Every structure is written in structure tokens, then in C-alpha cells.
Amino acid sequence: MLTTPERIAFLLLALASLLLTLRGVRLIVRAIGRGYGRPSWGVFLRRVIPVSLDILLQRPIFRTRPLVSLLHAGVFFAFVFYGLVNVLDLLEGFNGYSTLHASGVASAYNLVADLLSVAALLGMLGLLLRRFGLRPFRFNRAVFLLPSVRFGISRDSAIVGGFILLHVGSRWAGQAVRIAESGRPDWSQPTASLLARLLGGLDAATLAVASHATWWLALGLILVFLPYFPYSKHIHLFMAPLNLILREEKPLGRLEPPVGNGQLGSARLEELRWYQILDAYACIMCNRCQDVCPAHGTGRALSPAALEINKRYYLNRNLNRFAGGTTSPPLLETATSRAAVWSCTTCGACVRICPVGNRPMLDLIDLRRSLVFAGDELDPNLQAALESLSRYGNSFGKPARQRARWARDLPFPVKDARKEPVEYLWFVGDFASFDPRMQENTKTVAQLFHQAGVDFGILYEDEWNSGNDVRRVGEEGLFELLAEHNLAVLGKARFRAIVTTDPHSYNALRNEYSALGLDVPVYHYTEVLAELLERGQLRPSKRLQAVATYHDPCYLGRYNRITAAPRRVIRALGLELREMPRHGENTYCCGAGGGQIWMDSGGQERPSEQRIREAIALGEDVRFFVVACPKDMAMYSDAVKTTGYEQRLTVIDVARLVAWATGLIELEREAAPVSE
Amino acid sequence: MTLAVILKQVPDVVEELAIDPSGTDLDRDSVSYVVNEFDEHALEEALLLREATGEDVVVVGVDTTGELDQALYTALAKGAQRAVKLVGDVEGSWLSTRALAGLLAPVIRELSPRLVLTGVQAPDDLDGQLAPTLGALLDWPHTGVVVGTELADGLVRVRKELWGGIMLDLELATPAVLGIQAARATPRYVPVGRVRQAMRESTIEEVEVETPVESAPKLSRLRAPEAAGRAEMLTGSPSDVVERILEILRARGLY
Amino acid sequence: MAERILVLAEQLEGQLTDVTLELIGVARRLAAPRGSTVDALVLGEGVSALAATVPADRTLLMEHPALRLFNPEAAQRALEAVARETSPWLVLVPNTSLGMDVAAAVATRLGWPLVAYCQAIEERDGQLVATSQLFGGKILADCPVGTDHAVISVLAGAFSSEAAAPEPPARIERLAPPAELDGLRVRAVGLERPEAADVDITRAEKIVAVGRGIESKENLELAEELAEGLGAVVAASRPLVDAGWLPRSRQVGKSGLKVKPRLYLALGISGAPEHLEGMRDAELIIAVNTDPKAPIFDVAHYGVVADLFEVAEALQERLGG
């Protein structure tokens, strides 16, 4: 029980604290509201229950780092339960209601509160130990950070961690004091009772003071902390669920047009969409996104975490003005750098891993859009590619008429899908069509389709680049141009489904074009091959005895969750599949996506080289590095040479393996596997 | 004051070129057109000059392809202020440089620019380059193979490339005509969205011109270079080819 | 029958360029059957010694301070005046950076026809035909040349310079500069020669030359490795130098350097006429290009239609191993 002055003091403090906090929260809401668009209440209603359940089960957090996630879960569950604990403790302070030595439901409550307090304390200590001792925050030197960030993160972590330790610790200690005062242990609060035994020697007056002090430290502290809350990363405990709940169920592979007449893109904070500003408040600064980022992993200037953290720190320092509507400085001065913007491979790993549902990749794409539209200088290779794409419809600077040249070498004619109906319209893709190193694969796929009796055709020179990566380098107008052309051509052709050899084209056709009106099934060629093998239309004449690993292309595995089909093919051939640690939706980027294939990388090492090492680490007996993307074929054929593992590991397209098993081709240079 | 840039569309030499049955022209139906690469540099150089001195850039062209609008809108999107299109009964025809200069000269005189910039040469300027021809017609100072410009009071300083990296610095009284070999920077990229914006928001001025009597370059026939004297082609797998190359080198004591 | 062929001799700082001799060689060949004489016009200041070495029938020497360095306006005025005066049936001008400023302007002012980019001049059925290289060397145009005044601008390297007998001119005639040279609107300020290069590709015995086909700067490494394996130096076509991937001192071609190595391995070079001009005299040219119609195969001794990377890598493997 509090004294009357204490009660008055508490109420006054509570009033001041709430007013201050409210002001902060209002500013945040207004800041987020400066972004484009508005959240949809329909989405909220649809998602609030399932997503809340997800969060209660801590599923977004347990995607990676199991041990750390466990520590987090301790703090999290304690926090949720402490909602009730704090109310009851308030009651105790004001009118003496107590669950001490109670029985029934109250004793169960006591037990849970007691155990969760310890879980929270241990969890928090563990997290603090990790943050300040085992794995402190580190960014690549080239990463842009606001000056306030470097120190700010540690201070904020210390304040939030200290608050939780003090708040929970005081409550836990307070229970121990009250148990000691009662003179006997409360077995529904076992850990507090243990602590109480240590306090047994204290006299009643000291215990009474301690009881008041711990009450104030537990509950008064909340009031002190509360106004700071909107400025601390602790606000994630509201913003993260909100972010997760309000996120529309749209494929990651479908971008929204740029803001500002669908052209301008976003150069400043207020030119982002509302949820991109919310991202900064949802971010808990765990750096998981940075850990999986292939750009950061190869020493480049990009850290998706730093982007969100910078945004947040800019907002913290300028919240009043920003919420009030003043124009903010360019994001390239406050949040990230040009080098970082152009390092992104749009692999989507940061989005996939983020436990709070942030999408830093979208900021980077919107920044690219603004740079491109403003006429900022482009990487010369990228510029050449874009010019070639707008002139010839491909990035190779080759006349469109040469697109189907590879088909001339085949012993059978390939149908012209513009002139006759086909079952499968094969959208071949730029790399598979023009890159001399890939054309062998392309011919192999054609021969396999032919062998299996698939009715297929191509669009010849009327197939243009799908624009997937063009859109992701921020050249929206060119993407529209390419898409309009392809849609017009597809609209005139008669076919049942599209099959494509290129995961990037797959993504564009499936996710982007469907938003523009294309409504046909789209398959990746591995899906078709798997089915042809399973239906017996392709019959392997030999089983391949070797160990293989498979690299999931980002735009296939992560973006579109096609992970099973290529594996079905590999297993159907008799190969033993050994997975790399990063596979399926957690695959690691080859470094070529998002237009990187057209840019000078400038990193210390290429992601593709790291990936080859990952495969090598699987064991001496892994012979094949199987790919299902022409860009991967190019990237890994290079990487296996530059890393010096050319003799040990053979990079091979899955179609080549199928063709070898069915006797269509011989593998001379590729170290053919042993057959039975 | 203004800077006039002359843009000319020429057959894209990346594409396969076919000769018309008449034998004196390309098969224009199968040709695809691009802006002469050097003209792109001329435009870039003009835009760089504009950034330094604030001159207006006017792009001028004779529409021989029916597709010149695209090139002009692109130039406007890149930062030109005006676009002038000369139209007449010249579509689909191969204009000689002298005929082209003859059409342009009065229009350029009317524009009275400080400078005229165009590409140093074009893939089809059989009867000579445009800059010296136009310079002679206008009786303005001119020079070509220009790789850098700087405007000063009443004159333009240019850097002209000779050979072997030797540069010649010249000063020309303005107005002058320059044939640009390379702009000081790579011609800028213009996003498609900006071109579309220019198409919506800008207009192209049209000037009706009379068809010159003798408009085509004088030639008896076009032909593909003869196969004679062609290289002996080495075929086979890369390793076969390499073996052959090494043999050849060895035979000559080069390896 | 007209009597004279006028050749514009090209000199820079008292040095006659190779192309001048090539032009005089052609002029002599054309002059002989027609009974024409070959005049060479030397423009400059203090170049009388040079004039005495020009192997023409008659050397016309015009000296004036404005002609010291090349001045396009002065050269144009001078040639125009001389052409009016001597009324040659044929004027040959080099299609070089200097000649290009003059040929079209003079032809336009005189109203004489001009054939530019000429790579061959032949008699065909009693008609003189000048063949011009157009469309990046992909197409040739045969142009009839009459005997009633014509100007031809000739590509450097298209003809042999040996046909010009190394004998001094029969006579030297000094011409008074036209009055216009005193009121020019163009001033030549100065010449700048490139800084000494790390590698002198004109002296290299073997050259690995790369073009657009190399695609990116990173891929230059492969060329460097290959050059090392062959004991060669790396050179490039213009686009790569323009892109800043290699210094100017490595550029082969019209605006770059002229090379004559024992081996010229051209990787991913399609062979624009400007490039061919700088390397066609190499003793052995081996070209790798994906386009079977690339003009480089017209001057190469051996050609490979393939992806340059495949060949380069295979070659590198053999050399490295």
C-alpha cells in the first residue's frame, strides 16, 4: 500500500508521462502519414487474428538465430504477461489487493509471473551480453551511418535493456521483499521465495522501505520511461505487429509503380509510402537483414539495417519538423549512399528474413527510380544495357532478329508461336537467347521438349526482355515499354501456358504482367521437366550416380517458392542431393540480380564465389553444382574458375543432366557422372 | 543565344543491311534507323555547353525516315529547349550531304545560333561530312573531329583530335559549325518516362521545305565487300581452334 | 583531257604524313595513262625543305604564318584558290582529321562532286570508279568519277605508299597566299602531344587487341592475362578507350595509333573502317568475333566465329598450362 502523498505523486507523474508520450505518438503517426498511400482497414481486419497468432508463437522471429530467438521469446512472453502483472501491482499499490499466499487461479498467476520474470531477466541479460560482448554491432566501413547512430544504438540498447532489467528485476525483488515481510515462503512464487530467503535477516522497517522502493522502481519507472518510448527502438513492440498486420498479401515479386505519377520515385523520406516510414519504427535493429545481404556480405556499402536505422535516427532528431510537414533532405544525405543504392541485387533476402516485416529493398528500388528519372549518372555498362534494351529489346546490343539464331542449329524447326497455336509458349529470355555460353543449354531444353513430344513454340524476334531487372534498376518507363510490347505480342499468340527458362522472366510474367492483365499459367522449365519425367514422357536410360547440390535462384526459390520441382528432377535422375545450408527460400544470391549483371560490382569478393565455397564445404564427393537459371550458369561458371575449384565441382544446368540421362547428349568436358 | 544541334537518322549498322534491287540504295523497308552516333555526342556537347553558359539548345533535323519525332522528343527529354523538323517530300530517300546542307542552311541562318554542332561524320555521308559542307554554304568557320568545346566572348575554343593522341587547339569566331567526334562526357541516358513526358508536353516546330532536285548521292552501285581476301576461317570446338592458332603461331616463331 | 591531278600534301610540324605518299602514289597511277601531271600542294610556314622531298611532278608551296599549324579555314582558302587557279580534273585529299575539314568545304564551294571515304580507285569499262566505304564498312559504294573536276577524299592506309617513287619533285613552285589568309576567323592556338605512354604499342611485336565484345572493364583482365602468356601488349579499339577502360596510348585506329606488329590478335573487334586503318598492315591478323559478317574478317588472315571468351579462355588454359 502506498501512502497518500505517494499516490498523488504517482498520479501526477502518470498524467505528465502520458501527456508527453501521447505527444510523441501523435508526432509519429503524423510522420508516417506523410508517406504516400494509406493503410487498408480491410487488410487489418483480415489479418489481425492470424498475424497476431503468428506473433504470439514468435514465428517471424524463429526464422533464424534459434538461441537468440529463445531469449527474445522469454522477454516477449514476460512482456505480454506483464500487462496483467502491472495492473494487479497497481491495484496492490493503491488499495492493497495482493495475490501473495493466495490459492487457486491467483496462485497459478503467481507462478507464471514468477517464472516469466526470471525468463525475462535471463533473456534480457543474454541479449545484452550478446549485444555488448559477444556480437557487437558492426557495419562495413563503407556503409553510410548518421553520426548519431553509432553511439545511439548502444545507448538505446542500454537504456531499453536497463529498463527491462530494472522494471522486471524490481518487480521480482519486490515480490521477494513482500514474501520476506510475510515471514514464510510463497510456493507459488518459487524463485522470489528463494530470493526472499536471502532477505530473511533484514528488519521490518528496512523491508517496508524496500517494498515501497521496488514498487516505485517497477511501476514508477514505466512512467519515466514512457516519454522516451517513442524515440527508442522499444516501440517496435507496437509498430512491428502493426507492420506485420497491415502488410498487404501481395507477391514480393510484384512492385508498385513509383510514386509521383508513376514515374518520379522517392528521393526523400516523405516521398516513400507510409509503410516504408513505418518500417523505420518497426525496426528493432537486430541486423538480421544485414547478415543475409549479399552486398554487405561482400564488403559493399549497402546495409539494409543501416538504411532503416538511419531513417529512424533522422526521424528521432527531426520528428517535430518532419511531422509538421517541412521538406526533408534527400535520403542520400540522411539514410544511405549512392553506392549502397546501386549495390542491391534485389535478392529479397532482407525482406524474407526481417522478423518485423520490413522491406528495405523497396526503398532502394524507389531511390533508384528517382535517380534514374532525375538523370543521375549511371554505371556506363548499365547505361549501355538500357540503351540496347530500348533499341533492340535485349541487353546484348544485338539486333532483335538474331534472338532465335540458336534455333537454327537444331535438327527440327521450332514453331513460331506468333503464327500457329502451341500448347506451351516458351519465353526464352535474353541470356538464354543471346549469350553464346548459354545457347547450348537453350538448345538442350528445346531438344528435351522435342524428345518428350511437347508442343511448344517461341516468339522469335518479338520476344523482348521481360523487364524484370529493368524495373528493379528503376527504369520504370522502359519496363512499361518492354511489358507493353510483350503483352501485345502474347495477346496475339494462341497457347495454353507459358514456360520460361529464366527465373527473372518467370517472375515478371507471373507477378508483374499478371498485374497488367496477363492471365495464363506460367511455368518454370524445371516444373515442366519434372512433370515430363514423372509422366514418363522423358525416360532416363541411365541413373546418375553422383552427389549434387542445387542452387535456388532468388527469383525462383525465394520470390516464387518453386523449390520442389528442380529437386524432383535431380532425384528422378538418381542423383544424391545434398543441400547447402542456405537453400530453398533462404537461398543466397549469385550477385547478378536487380541489374547487377550490368554493373561493375566493385566488391571484395563476389557472392557467387562465396556460394561456391559453401558448396565445396559440403564435402569432397559433391560433383555437381546444379543451376536452373541462365544468369546463374554465367555467374557460377566464372566463380568456380576464379575460386580454383573447377576440377572438383562442375556447374551444370539441370536440363543438361536430364539430357545426359536420356542419352540426348554426351558430357565430355563436364566430367560425366558414373551411370548404372 | 542558341546552340543548334543537327540530328540525322541513319541506318543502324548493327543490323544486317540489304541492298535494294535497284542496286543504288539500301533496302529501306528492312532498315531500322538510329540517330547517328556522333550526332548524339554533338547533342551531349551542346547540353554540356548549356549547363555552363545557359544557352538554349535547338535540335534540328530533316525528316527522311518518318521517325524523326522520336529522336527529337528524346533530345527534348534530354534537355533541349526547342525542336525543329524540316518536312517535305524526302521521306525514305537518301539525301546527299550537300542536299541536306542545302535544306538546313536557310533554317540555320534564320535561327542565327552561336554554334552549330553535329556529328563529325555519318555512316552514309558519301559526298562528305555535314559540318564542313554546311560551314562552306553558310560561309561560317567550321572544323570537325572535335572532342571538347568552350564558349568565350565571340568565339569558341575547340579541341580537335588529330591522330595518335595529338590534339590541336583552335579558336573559331562564332557563329561556327562544329563536327563533334566525342562529347566531353558519355551521352547521357534519358529515361523512357521522360521521353513520354516530352511527347505529351512539348511540341515540335515544323518547317516545310522544297525537295532538292538532285537529292541522292551519285553512285553507280552499292555492294557488299568482296569475300576475296577474306580470312581463312578456323572452325571446331574452342580447344580445336586454339590448337590451330598455336600451330600458326609456332610456324611463324611467334609462340 | 584535263591535265592535272592536285594532291593536298598533309604535313604536321614539318613532317609529311604517310597518307600523303599514298595519295601521290595513286595520283601517279591515275596520271600515267592519261598523260596528266601530279601537283602536290604543300601548305605551311618554313617548310621549303619539306617541299623539296615531295615526290610529285610539281610541288606547289604556299607559306604563310596562318598555315604554320593546321588551320582549317586557311587550308580551305588556300586549296580553293589553288584549285581555281590550276583547274585540276581531280583533287585528292586525305580523309583524315585535317583533310576532312577541307575536302567537303572546298568541293562545296567549287561546286565539284566529292567522293569521301575512298578506299579504291579503279578503271572499269573505261570509266574511273572510286569505291567508298559506307555503313561502318559493311557496304561499298562504287561512284563514277568524271574527268570534269572531282574531289576524292581517300582513307589513310587504303593505298600503298611505295608507288610514290622516292624521288624529289621535278620542280617547286612558290605560290602567293590568297589575300583571305590575312583576315581569318579561325586561329590555331597550339598542339598538344600525348604524355609518354607506359607501353608503346607501335613498337610491340605482338598485340592482343580488344573491342566492344569484351563487354565490361572487368573482362580486360582476361586480355591482360592472355597478352602476358603470349608476350604481347594489350591494345583496344576506340569505344574502350572512350569508356576510359584503357589509356589513349593503347588505341589503335584512325584517331589512335597505327600499328604494324607481327601478330595482331583481335578479340571482339568488329572492324570499323577507322579501326582497320590502324592495323591492316600487321603481318598476321587473327580475329575472333561472333558475327561472321564482321568486316574484321576482311583484313584478317585467320578468323574464328565464336565467343571471344570461349576462345580466350581455352587459349589462356593452353598458355598457362
Image: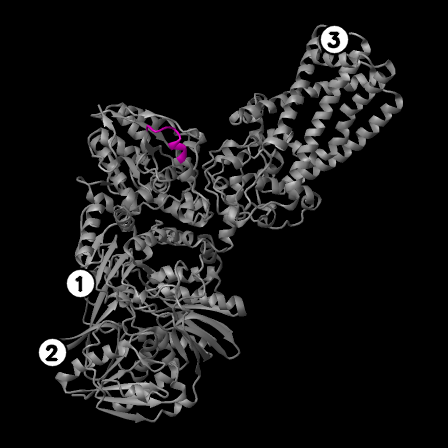
Q: Chain of mark 3?
A: A
Quarter of the figure that contains the N terminus of chain C: bottom left
Quadrant hosting residue A115 = top right
Note whether residue B19 is visible.
no
Of residues A573 and A94, which is closer to you in this image? A573
Within the image, what quadrant is residue B98 found in?
A: bottom left
Q: Which residues are magenta?
A: A613-621
Q: Amino acid at mark 2?
A: Gly
Do badges 3 and 1 share one subunit?
A: no
Q: Which numbered tag is attached to residue B21? A: 1
Chain hosting mark 2: C
Q: Which residue is more in the foreground, B56 or C54? A: C54
Q: Label 3, secondary structure: give it.
A: loop
Label 1, residues with CA under 10 Å away: few <14, some 14-19, many ≥20: few
Disc 1 sits on a residue from what chain? Answer: B
Point out residue B58 in the picture as x, y percentages from the top left corner.
46, 68
Q: Kindly identify the residue that appears in the image at 35 percent across and 40 percent down.
A: A644
Q: Is residue A467 above or below residue A135?
A: below
Q: Is residue C103 above or below residue A585?
A: below
Q: Quadrant location of residue B115?
A: bottom left
Residue A184 locus on image (x, y percent): 78, 7
Label 1 to label 2: alpha-carbon separation: 25 Å
Q: From what the image shows, is residue C305 above or below residue C114?
A: above
Residue where numbered disc 2 is placed: C126
The furthest residue to the left: C125
Cα separation between marks 3 and 1: 107 Å
What is the distance, in whole Å, between disc 3 and disc 2 at their CAs?
Answer: 124 Å
Question: Label for residue A186?
Answer: 3
